């Protein structure tokens, strides 16, 4: 594994690092800057990190162009959507009518593996093949979410309020994003490890091209 530095002001070096990678994992974190999808900040927008936005968007776009395996988790899922021209609700409670609660943050007293709600998995998707189930329970630590779906992305899971909770690109290339945090759910649901196994296996295949 390689922790990629925030070389937003040195894309030439960032590209050289990218070329050494066989797959990309985009982790969770702070809010995505709404300027990236043409909106002004909402009063409930949280902290943003423009340098991280720039680096992760560059890595995502390069990976999608090259067919390099990509897995996005929470913020990484949102970055994938924005990279494909989509947009986000800056605060679900304020902007999505009928929204259930999604912000079960540890700093509010919840464990990171707290199962907040279920998601329905769309049949005939990569996600359905990985979990082999029509519905799973997930944790939830976000207050932003997909507003307009990015180009060519397939919604592969939805929350009870209709919010898209997973997306993927169709075809053989591995490009998948989930809104929840599977990295903390391996004891709750051992099937979640299949997401990371699938990324690793796709990276091995990519390296062997």
Image (cartoon, rainbow, N blue to C red):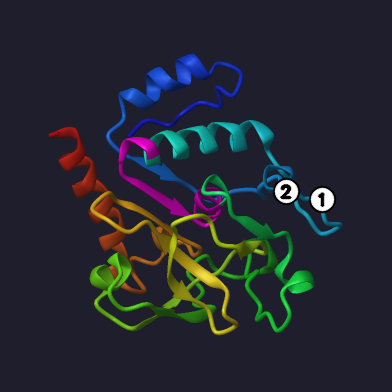
Which one is in front, 6 or 56?
A: 56
Rendered residue at 57%/80% (across/down):
162
Element under label 2?
Answer: helix
Q: Which residue bears the numbered disc 1?
A: 41
User: How many C-alpha atoms fall within 10 Å of the one at disc 2: few (<14), some, or many (≥20)?
Assistant: some
Horizontal and vertical percent for residue 163? 57, 74
Residue 209 rendering spot, x and y as whole percentages: 14, 34
Q: Is residue 14 left or right of residue 130?
A: right
Q: Residue furthest right?
A: 43
Q: Secondary structure at mark 1?
A: loop
Q: Which residues are magenta?
A: 65-81
Q: Residue furthest left?
A: 208
115 vs 82, left or right, is left
Residue density around tag 1, few if under 14, some if 14–19, many if 20 or more, within 10 Å: few
Instruction: Tell whether position 123 is magenta.
Output: no
- Write the residue at 43% across / 21% down: 15
For the residues labelled 1 and 2, say whether their Cβ atoms are less than 8 Å apart. Answer: yes
65 left or right of 150? left
Q: Which residue is painted at 30% across and 41% down in the image?
A: 67
The total of numbered circles placed on residues is 2
Within the image, what quadrant is residue 141 found in? bottom right
The residue at the point 52 percent across, 37 percent down is: 56
- Height in image: 49 above or below 113? above
Lateral position of residue 140 relative to residue 200, left or right: right
What residue would you read off at disc 2? 34
The label shown at residue 167 is none
- Residue 193, horizontal then vertical, whole percent: 28, 61
User: The N terminus appears in which quarter of the rendering?
Assistant: top left
Residue 73 falls within the magenta-colored stretch: yes
Which of the two discs, 1 and 2, labels the residue nearer the N terminus? Answer: 2
């Amino acid at each position: 594994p390689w922790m990629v530095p925030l070389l937003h002001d040195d894309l030439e070096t960032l590209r050289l690092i990218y070329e050494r990678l066989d797959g990309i994992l985009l982790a969770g974190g702070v809010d995505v800057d709404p300027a990236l999808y043409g909106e002004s900040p909402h009063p409930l927008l949280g902290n943003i990190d423009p340098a991280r936005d720039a680096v992760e968007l560059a890595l995502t776009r390069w990976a999608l162009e090259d067919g390099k395996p990509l897995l996005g988790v929470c913020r990484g899922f949102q970055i994938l959507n924005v990279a494909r021209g989509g947009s986000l609700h800056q605060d679900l409670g304020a902007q999505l009518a009928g929204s259930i609660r999604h912000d079960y943050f540890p700093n509010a007293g919840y464990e990171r593996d707290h199962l907040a709600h279920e998601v329905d998995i769309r049949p005939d998707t990569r996600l359905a093949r990985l979990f082999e189930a029509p519905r799973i329970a997930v944790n939830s630590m976000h207050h932003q979410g997909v507003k307009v779906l990015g180009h060519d992305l397939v919604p592969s899971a939805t929350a009870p309020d209709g919010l898209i909770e997973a997306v993927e690109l169709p075809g053989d290339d591995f490009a998948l994003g989930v809104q929840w945090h599977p990295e903390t759910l391996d004891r709750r649901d051992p099937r979640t490890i299949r997401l990371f196994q699938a990324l690793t296996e796709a990276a091995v295949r990519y390296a062997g091209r």
